[in-house]
Image: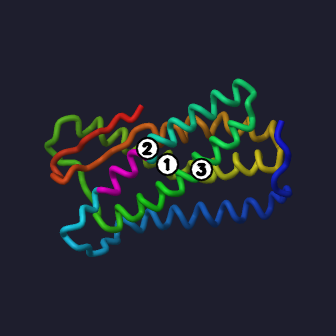
Amino acid sequence: MLKQVIQKNDAKARLIIGIVSVVVFVAVVALKYIAIPVDPSFDVHVFATINAYLNGSVAVLLVIALLAVKMKNYSLHKRTMFAAIILSVIFLLSYIAHHALAGDTSYPKDAPYRAFYLIILLSHIMLAGIILPFILFTAYRALTAEFPAHKKLARITWPIWFYSVHRCYRISDDPSLLHLINVI
């Protein structure tokens, strides 16, 4: 097993994780009401493509990390999970930039598979909205070397995190088209 990296302080961890989670949630919800003007020659949808690659990379890292821990290669597991968290932070920043610059895009009402798309989107939004504190608490339990608690929480966190990143969407330059990129 790995050594403790940070000193255990559950009260402080709850406070920090709670603040970070609320700030991120509010920032993402606020995107519905924010549209930053941008030079028309700049393709704001480049962020959507970046987001797809970032999320796809996180999904691959999550699978590698799961395999590493199953093989008891805890050092690889730790490095891979750290990379997944870093890429998720970069994704979040890119996601915020994209939606702040591109504004809100709706799936066309008469488009085929609209109901299917909205069901997937709704489940993704709900799970993505709750996963951050789970990720942070799971990482905290690992960093404080509370491995039984980490393992118990990871069994809930991993599948939700994986679901929230394994499908990547890119809205094309033509708002009437939705390209679904299956990274995995």
Q: Position of residue 99 (x, y in %)?
A: 35, 62
Mark 2 lies on residue: 124
Mark 1 lies on residue: 128
Q: Which residue type does callout 3 highlight?
A: Ile
Q: Which residue type does callout 1 highlight?
A: Ala
Q: Position of residue 127 (x, y in %)?
A: 50, 45
Mark 3 lies on residue: 85
Sequence-first disc among 2 and 3: 3
The reply to whether the magenta stretch includes residue 73 is no
Whether label 1 touches label 3, CB < 8 Å: no
Name the main secondary structure of what is drawn in magenta: helix
Q: CA distance from mark 1 to mark 3?
A: 14 Å
When asked about the image quadrant of residue 11, the answer is: bottom right
Q: Quadrant of the N terminus?
A: top right
Seen from the viewer's position, the closer of residues 10 and 173 is: 173
Residue density around tag 2, few if under 14, some if 14–19, many if 20 or more, within 10 Å: some
Whether label 1 touches label 2, CB < 8 Å: yes
